Structures are given as structure tokens and as C-alpha cells.
Image (cartoon, rainbow, N blue to C red):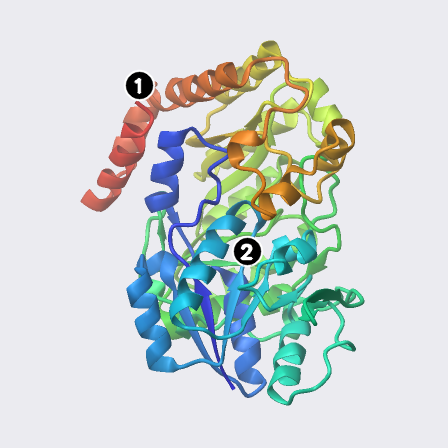
Amino acid sequence: MKVTFVYPPKQSMGKLFYPAKVWKNYSESAVILPNLGIAYLAALLRENGHEVDLIEGHALDLTLEQILDRLESFKPEYLLYTSITDNFQDTVWWINEIRQRYDKPVVIGGPHLGVYPRETLSYECIDYAVIGDGWETLPELMDALQKNKTLSDIKGIGYKKIKKVVITEPRPQVLTLEDVPFPARDLLPNDKYDTVLSKRKPVTSMITNLGCPFKCTYCCTDRNLRVSSPEYVVAEIEECINKYGIREIEFYDETFTLNSKRMSRFLDLLEEKKLDFLWSARTSVRCVTKEMLERMAKSGCIRVSFGIEVGNEEILKNIRKPIKNYMVRDGVKWAKQAGITVLGFFILGLPNETEETINDTIKLMLELDLDYVELNKFVPVPNSQLYEEFKKDTGVDFWRDYTLGKATFEDLKPYKLHVSPERLDELQANGYRQFYFRPKSIWRKLVAVRSFSELYRLATAARSLI
């Protein structure tokens, strides 16, 4: 059976978290990386005997007409989409527009379906939903559709029967990345992926852990941690380098260095194999040591991104973030001493924050020897503890209303915040300016520039802050 994954362009992911000008630049040019979820599923469906195409409209910036041309050429029998909650309305718009001209059944999956499957299936243009991990569910669903089998026995799906939405029994999430083939990167425009911080091209991303064991109240990440072995990770790196010519990899795990023994073995393998690539990773200051960071730098690690979040330790305690400011200072200092660039993630406007606590965060951000920062506004996200508290306290399930088209982003107000939304925007924008327009920051960026294209991207990002 022929199927096509459609990843539309110009998604609104992140719009709520950034100042308007920053978001526009960030979404359009700063980070363009593959959607690994659909690349994994594409590989799985091919392994199960289906003919698969993947239209990467985001990286290629395709128009509606170009997408339709691809569909008319390949002629798939089913169209497959993915969605997170804050870009769901964008996804629905594209599904509707495409279906008016290429009318084939639609299957949708992604994190959003784990929260609002019934609401999603209320749209006439959507026929089937994959709820939770798609590793087993999607191949089983496509096989049943191809052979006209009953759907009621398939765990983890939603569908329509006589205009009623049917949701089947949940499927346990037990598979690891080692149980599925590597992502189908041959279906991706690898030469189009890039980030404003990348040093080499082509760039790609990888995931080596599923889930996270920590219990931060603002986060919606699954607690069911499933870890790939160092040998498996290095095998995928070798495929990226040898088969696709990848020269830089960004590891998108929530906490890449979570297990020190695993990291030690991973670094041993990189040293043994002498692989020529640069890499970066996201992690926590509580999961690094001076020695580990030194070894990471020697193996080609050029950047670490630390989830620092806030500078006020009382707020840290409230959100169950298991770090202290001294740990942040040590982690950043060790990374810089090792020669690694450091990006810090911060959140402004968490529940019970005041202008004083927000200024504590900005003060810490300016004190640290960071190279880059992301200073995001807090947004309660589905499946997080704070969103459950938000629903209970307000009596409103905002994201359900948004899914149904009954609410817009403008209807989502700050939660238990002791500054006005307008003042929060000012503090965020001023924080960005204070950080990036310091003489030290400007000089450091200019010295590090290695190409005109890199200089252009940094200048464009700076212009968006003015």
C-alpha cells in the first residue's frame, strides 16, 4: 500500500514562548531539523512492506501546490500527519486544504493525540488517530486498513464508526528505539537542515533516550524512561556519517548525560572509532562532571544546552527542579573550561513569580558565562502537573477548547503571576537585549564566526531583538 507522510511548512511551534519578533526569526530560520518521529515511522512502514513517501514541507518551505504535485505524482492511498498541541490548528488547516484537492483518508498521530484524541477526531477531515507510541500501532493499523480487518482489537487507536468516535484500549509503551529501524533519512532533505549555532553541514538530530525520570511540574515529558545502548547510538552515528555524509549531530534527548556509566562507554567508543563529526546535547547541570565535560569536548562536543530555568531557588523548589544555583555555576564553568559553548534555557512567569523573582533569573543569566540563552515565557502545557492545577483552579481546559477551535492563543492568560502580561513581555525582551547586546557577547560572536552565512544568520537574529 502507498502512504505519504506530510510534514507541512510554517508551523507555529514556539509562538507562545518567544517575543513576536524573536519567534518569527526563530521559527523561520534559526532551527530547521528533521522530525525524527515521522522518519522512524516511515522506516517501520517500509519494513512492513508499504511504499512510503515523506513530504518534508517545513525544511523545503513547500507551497500547497508543490505538496499537491508530489501527492499526484506518488498517488498514496493514505495521508499521514503528526501534531503537537500548540501547532494543531496549523496542521488542521493544511489537512483541510490538501484534502479539498487530494481526497484520501487521513491518519494523524503525535503527542497531541495522547491528550485530545476525541476532540481531534471531531474534525471531518481526520479519519484515524494513533494514540501514544506509533511503533507497533501504526503498522498494525495500516495492515488492518489494507486488508479490511476489524479495527476494534487494535490497541491505541481512534476512528469513526457510524459518525461516532471510537477510542480503543491503550497500548502499553514498552518498545525502545533499539526495537525499531533507524530513521529513514534517505527520505529527508538532509542538506536543508541547519541551526543558527551549527558549525558544519549537513546537520541532523538524534534521539537516544525516550522519556525522563525527573518530575518537574512544568514538563509533559513521559516518565517511562527507555534508554538505547552506547553501541546502538554509535552505530546510528556511523550510518549518519558514512551513508548520509552528516558532519554535525544535535542530540535531542531531554538529558543526554543522564547515566554516567553509559556516557563513559559512549565516549570510549567515540575515541576508539575516531569518528569525524561535531555534536551537541541537552542535559542537566546535575548530570555532568568536570571530567565528563573534558572528555566530551575531546570527542567533538561543541555545545551543551543546560535547562537552568530560574534563578530563584524558592521557585526552583516549587517546580520540583532538582538543582541549585551553585550546581548551575559549576556546570557552566566546567563546560567553558573544557572549551564547550554553553546555551542556557530559562523560563519567566512561572506560577507565584513576582518581578523580583524574575529579576533573580535575569541576574543569574547575566552572571553566568553563557554563550547563548533562550528566555521563554511559561506556558502550561497538556499532561504537565501545572496544567492539571491550572484546569482545576480556573475550571477551563484551554487546550481542549483550542483543539476544538473555540479558543485562540490570545485567550491563554498567565497563571498565578504577580506581574501583568505586558510587563512580562517587557522583562523578557529586556532580558534578551541585556544579554546579547553586552560588548562581551558581541565580541565573542564575532570572533567565533567562520563564514559569511553564519554572520548573516547571527545578524538577522540580533536584528529581531531590536
Identify which residue is drawn at 37% across, 20% down. 433
Q: Which residue is mark 1?
A: 439
Percent position of residue 450, x then y: 24, 43
Instruction: Give the alpha-carbon distance from disc 1 to disc 2, as whole Å.
Output: 41 Å
Residue at far front of view: 162
Tell me the crowding category of disc 1: few under 14, some 14 to 19, or many 20 or more residues within 10 angstroms, Cα based: few
Compare marks 1 and 2 and give the one earlier in the sequence. Answer: 2
Q: Which residue is mark 2?
A: 83
Of residue 230 and residue 141, the one placed in the foreground of this image is 141
Identify which residue is drawn at 27% across, 29% down. 463
Under mark 2, the amino acid is Ser
Of residue 74 and residue 323, the one placed in the foreground of this image is 74
Above or below — where is 352 with respect to 231?
above
Count of marks overlaid on the render:
2
Of residue 343 and residue 108, the one placed in the foreground of this image is 108
Q: Secondary structure at mark 2?
A: loop
